């Protein structure tokens, strides 16, 4: 068995349980914002917490938000999803607006999508309208009743006209035209 | 250790030897035996694999092209038309489908492909084009065109 | 997978049995055609890694036609592996010994040498004459078209037919027919 997927797993585009068709279940379950109260790298995330975090949790009552201040450590977002995925993301030196956008990404995505390479950018349950090709699609119905081998189906039918056949054709034409002449007289 | 001459700098490859090796070991993670555990063996194999990967990026495109050509040829033979005249006819009828779409149509939507073959053949007939690669008279399946508007559309000056 | 899809899958990958009449055919050119059917390259679903090859039954392999003086000149090489174990057998000798051998080797050579080749060859049946076992005949559902027309001998045509056939010219009276 190959373990080529050690670098990056490959997957198809999919929505869990047809999420978004009829009803939408937010796949993000829990998000932890880790930051430092004094360090400059956490400046953006501190701004975000001060200005937008309360609104964020109010708008998403299904998401558990934790704040985890810690001294002199880099700022980090950790998101956990319904399917058990855990996305760890450093927001070192990220500005307020960048973090707002990343929070939106984490909230709307349906798991660790960046952890897999998409094999195809499209997916369908119905790849064919007319039905895929089968050996029987364009089969000559005469073959169903023929007893094989039969020179009718075995002889080459794509050969050009031979010199003999051309002469023969000319001869037949001549005979017909001679007949017409006689009738004309 | 103090390096006084430039020659001694050659051996110094930076302070983060662990992480440098770690990067190679990551790429050798799916190998077997010493190739994944010994750095000196792993790095050789990883470099070779990367060279193969570089070459394969081009080869993959060629392989796909060959595969599509095989599939289109197979489908053309069923409809008694050469791949050349199919392409020529479709070009003249301003139907610009690439190999991939034609091969996909041949496998997934066979009736559509049959119509395309018929269109190409009809266009060539209208243009009085003689297929130099196919000296033979196609006498097999007669691809009947039932669409009346199609003929008018093909005759339009494009 | 739903039942309909499963049936679709069976239909798409169904094996067809083809019959090919080797009478008066060049084995090396026919091998290219037979190879295409054995590997499934005549299907638009072809992929080297999917198992879509068909079965080909060759008949009349005794009556193949080689080009030029190939019967006398073409040699088949075999080595036993021991020193001095090389043998060169002429085509006519091979054909006398085993009438199926030339076509078999031609098809084998036409395919690329990989692990699949010997398994693909298992799907090729060759018979020296018209007679085929009954269990094989009843599988055959398609015939591969020959490359060349099988010529008819003059003495096999009716006398009347020959007389009716248009003449371009008459031989001069002093012409000596060989």
Image (cartoon, coloured by chain):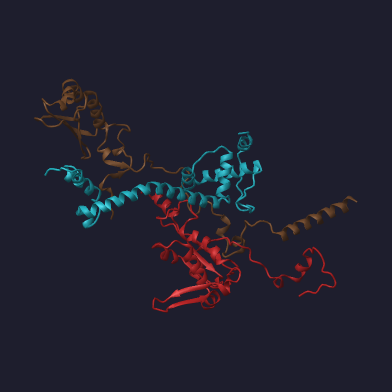
Quarter of the figure with residue A19? top left
Letter of the chain in brown: A
Image-based side of C104 in relation to B133, left or right? left
**Residue placed most toward the observer, B149 or B65:** B65
Quadrant of the image occupied by residue C172: bottom right
Q: Colour of chain C?
A: red
Measuring from the top left, give residue A14's x and y in whole percent.
Answer: 32, 39
Image x and y of residue A140, in percent: 56, 55
The x, y position of residue B137, in whole percent, is 64, 53
Can you say whether C80 is above or below B23 in the image? below
Residue B60 versus residue C142: which sits nearer the camera? B60
Tell me where residue A97 sits by quadrant: top left
- Residue drawn at x 62%, y 43% is B124
Residue toward you, C114 or A158: C114
- Asked if one can make out residue C169 in the rendered structure from this viewpoint, the answer is yes
Q: Quick check: B123 above or below A60?
A: below
- In the picture, which quadrant includes the C terminus of chain C? bottom right
A88 above or below B47? above
Horizontally, residue A21 falls left or right of residue B84, namely left
Q: Does residue B60 appear to the left or right of B139 in the view shown? A: left
Determine the colour of chain B: cyan
* Residue farthest along the right direction in this orientation: A185
Q: Residue furthest top?
A: A51
The percent coordinates of residue C51 (x first, y second) are 41, 57
């Amino acid at each position: 068995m190959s373990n080529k997927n050690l670098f990056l797993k490959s997957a198809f585009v999919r929505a869990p349980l047809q999420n978004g068709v009829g009803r939408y279940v937010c796949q993000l379950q829990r998000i932890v914002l880790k930051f430092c109260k004094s360090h400059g790298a956490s400046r953006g995330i501190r701004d975000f917490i001060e200005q937008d975090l309360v609104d964020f949790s109010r708008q998403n009552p299904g998401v558990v938000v934790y704040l985890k201040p810690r001294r002199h450590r880099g700022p980090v977002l950790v998101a956990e999803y319904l399917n058990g995925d855990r996305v760890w993301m450093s927001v070192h030196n990220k500005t307020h607006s960048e973090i707002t956008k990343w929070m939106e990404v984490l909230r709307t995505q349906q798991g660790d999508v960046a952890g897999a390479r998409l094999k195809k950018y499209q997916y369908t349950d119905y790849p064919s309208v007319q039905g895929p090709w089968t050996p029987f699609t364009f089969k000559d119905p005469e073959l169903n009743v023929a007893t094989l081998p039969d020179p009718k189906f075995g002889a080459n039918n794509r050969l050009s006209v031979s010199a003999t056949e051309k002469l023969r054709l000319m001869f037949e034409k001549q005979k017909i035209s001679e007949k017409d002449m006689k009738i004309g007289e | 250790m103090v390096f006084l001459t430039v020659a001694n700098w050659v051996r110094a490859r930076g302070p983060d030897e662990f992480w440098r090796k770690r990067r190679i070991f990551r790429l050798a993670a799916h190998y077997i035996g010493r190739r994944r555990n010994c750095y000196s063996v792993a790095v050789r194999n990883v470099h070779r694999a990367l060279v193969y990967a570089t070459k394969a990026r081009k080869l993959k495109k060629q392989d796909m092209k060959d595969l599509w050509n095989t599939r289109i040829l197979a489908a053309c033979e069923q409809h008694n038309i050469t791949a050349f005249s199919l392409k020529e006819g479709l070009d003249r009828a301003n139907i610009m489908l690439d190999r991939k779409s034609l091969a996909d149509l041949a496998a997934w939507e066979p009736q559509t492909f049959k119509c395309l073959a018929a269109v190409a053949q009809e266009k060539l007939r209208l243009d009085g084009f003689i297929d130099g690669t196919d000296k033979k008279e196609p006498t097999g399946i007669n691809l009947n065109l039932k669409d009346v508007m199609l003929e008018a559309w093909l005759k339009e000056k494009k | 997978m739903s039942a309909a899809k499963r049936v679709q899958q069976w239909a798409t990958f169904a094996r067809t049995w083809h019959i090919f009449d080797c009478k008066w055919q060049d084995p090396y050119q026919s091998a290219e055609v037979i190879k295409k059917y054995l590997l499934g390259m005549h299907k638009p679903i072809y992929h080297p890694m999917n198992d879509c090859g068909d079965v080909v039954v060759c008949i009349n392999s005794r009556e193949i036609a080689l080009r030029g003086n190939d019967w006398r000149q073409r040699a088949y090489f075999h080595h036993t592996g021991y020193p001095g174990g090389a043998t060169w057998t002429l085509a006519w000798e091979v054909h006398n010994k085993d009438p199926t051998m030339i076509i078999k080797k031609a098809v084998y050579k036409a395919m690329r040498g990989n692990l699949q080749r010997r398994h693909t060859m298992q799907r090729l049946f060759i018979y020296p004459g018209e007679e085929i076992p009954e269990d094989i005949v009843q599988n055959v559902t398609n015939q591969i078209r020959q490359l060349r027309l099988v010529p008819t001998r003059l003495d096999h045509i009716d006398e009347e037919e020959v007389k009716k056939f248009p003449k371009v010219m008459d031989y001069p009276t002093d012409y000596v027919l060989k």
